[in-house]
Amino acid sequence: MNQSIDKPLLGIRILDLTRLLPGPVATMHLADMGAEVIKIEDPGIGDYARTMGYVRHDVSQFFIAVNRGKQFIRLDLKEISQRDEFLRMVETADVVVESFRPGVMDKLGAGWEILKQRNPRLVMCAISGYGQDGPFTHLAGHDINYVGYAGMLEQNVGPDGIPALPNLQIGDLLGGSQTAVQGILAALLGAKMTGQGRFVDVSMTDAVFAHNIMPLVAVNNFGKPAAPGRDLLTGGVPCYNVYRTSDDRFMAVGALELKFWEICCDVLDRADLKACHWSHGQKIGGTEAMAVKSELDVIFAQQTLAVWTERFAAADCCVTPVLRTDEAIAHPLFLKRGAVRHVTHAIEGDYWETDASVKFRI
């Protein structure tokens, strides 16, 4: 593929001061799109992700997974000469991304007011838990806190009614990484059109709150969200649910539309259940819906994941296996699109690497 097509951000230079997960993933996405990303770490341990979790030799797989395609330098911004070096780099940069607590960059002598004087076209993105202003500005937090405040975690319950911690860090990745990429790209476009840079304030909690759509719809309709696990997309209907198989695996039934539900019922040899669909007036989360779910629990428990996967393979009705990550890596869905590849790190050896999540063509 022509590199200029595959890398639309060629020529964009980004200075990345972030650590751990949200900021590094954001700048990795921008690097995937062709931006030159220079990751600036403190002397010594640097980004804490380097040693977080299991380390084979020198650096963790966590760090490798979220920092591909970047250059790495060390600068101590508390030291005047090295801060001045950073400020000179800002003059030729397009973007600075940081994820310190609000006010830290100002204390280092590298806050927005100083940086925009050095480079009026600069885009500066600050990723924080609770935003650059407001009552929680200076409070510490992690993903669990952000999704808890935003009303998301309360709805994400297991069968025991206890909120289940999602494997995907929604606050960090949706709230931090993707929102930062969105804001940075918009501000870069604005700078190109007007010559004026912008400060991008990303609150991870705000972003999760803004995307917590279905509970907000319920509040607007009924004054409160549905009971956890009982809304349309959280377990309140049999046509959108997960079912345990005989080998203790799970099938994901996403037959939300009536036509898909009817096909699903045919595969299950239960044509009588076709009328038991929410679009026919079945109360979401009601007794009837839960009774039908219980019937499907019994049906799916009679066969293995492999058997159900084969039976539904020829039926286009949104019923699919729930895969482990090692199974997903080997699945044709990802292999044939080049979404994952086996690579070798100079120090850490062989590992699996995901490809850029956005592909371009003309």
Image (cartoon, rainbow, N blue to C red):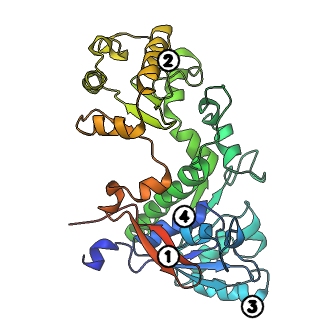
How packed is label 1: few (under 14 Cα within 10 Å), some, or many (20 or more)?
A: many
Q: Looking at the image, do the residues carrying marks 4 and 1 touch, with CB atoms under 8 Å apart? A: no
**Where does the C terminus fall, quadrant-wise?**
bottom left
Q: Which mark is residue 94?
A: 1
Q: Give percent across and percent down for residue 309.
A: 34, 39
Q: Earlier in the sequence, mark 1 or mark 3?
A: 3
Asked whether the viewer can see residue 284, the reply is no
Q: Nearer the viewer, mark 3 or mark 2?
A: 2
Q: Residue at x 62, y 51 (%)?
A: 203
- Secondary structure found at label 2: helix
Residue occupied by mark 4: 25
Label 2, residues with CA under 10 Å away: few <14, some 14-19, many ≥20: few
Q: Amino acid at mark 2?
A: Asn
**In 3D space, how far apart are the residues under numbered discs 1 and 3 (Cα atoms)?**
22 Å
Q: Neighbour class for label 4 at 10 Å: few (<14), some, many (≥20)? A: many
Residue labelled with disc 3: 81
SS under mark 1 = loop
Which residue has dot 2 on it? 221
- Helix, strand or loop at label 4? It is helix
